[in-house]
Amino acid sequence: MYYTYMIRCIDNSIYTGMTNNVDKRLSEHIKNKGAKYTKSHQAERLEAAWRSKDKSLACKLEYQIKQLTKKQKEDIIKGEKLSSYLKGKIDCRRYYRIKRVGK
């Protein structure tokens, strides 16, 4: 399984990435051993994650989420369905939301 995830940083920005181990990757981000972005924007917590069956699907979702506005990302974190913003771009039925943390 692969996962696409969204992390809240201490400056309130949102980082989106993909991995095959969410817990390990989150730990790396928090310990400043993750992506270049989270090294300079200190990762704080996992906001949401979606499971998909293969790496290609996870990468496609990551790309599409990164194209969204900050408000759209916030709406998805709050529970708005992916299809609200990504219908016609990807098949949203191929992703299963596994975690919702935050407000």
Image (cartoon, rainbow, N blue to C red):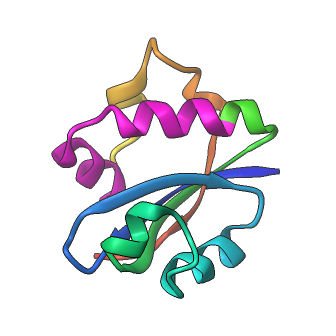
> Residue at the spot x=19%, y=75% of the render?
11
Q: Which residue does the image show at 77% across and 57% down from the upper left?
A: 20
Q: Which residues are magenta?
A: 58-79
Q: Position of residue 95 (x, y in %)?
A: 64, 39
Q: Position of residue 65 (x, y in %)?
A: 41, 38
The quadrant in which residue 43 appears is: bottom left
What quarter of the picture does the C terminus occupy?
Answer: bottom left
Q: Nearer the viewer, residue 67 or 101?
A: 67
Q: Is residue 28 left or right of residue 36?
A: right
- Name the residue nearer the viewer: 32 or 53: 32
Q: Residue at x 61, y 83 (%)?
A: 27
Whether residue 5 is visible to the viewer of this picture, yes or no, is: yes
The quarter of the picture where residue 8 lies is bottom left
> Residue 87, how many percent across, how many down?
43, 19
View extreme (bottom): residue: 31
> Can see residue 82?
no
Q: Quick check: is 76 in the magenta stretch?
A: yes
7 left or right of 52?
A: left
From the image, give the main secondary structure of the stretch colored magenta: helix
Q: Spot the residue most to the top.
A: 88
> Number of numbered discs present?
0
Location of residue 63 with respect to 33 vertically, above or below: above
Frontmost residue, 85 versus 11: 11
Instruction: Give above or below for 47 relative to 4.
Output: below
At 33% from the left and 46% from the top, the residue drawn is: 80
Residue 83 picture location, percent across and down: 42, 29
Residue 3 is inside the magenta segment:
no
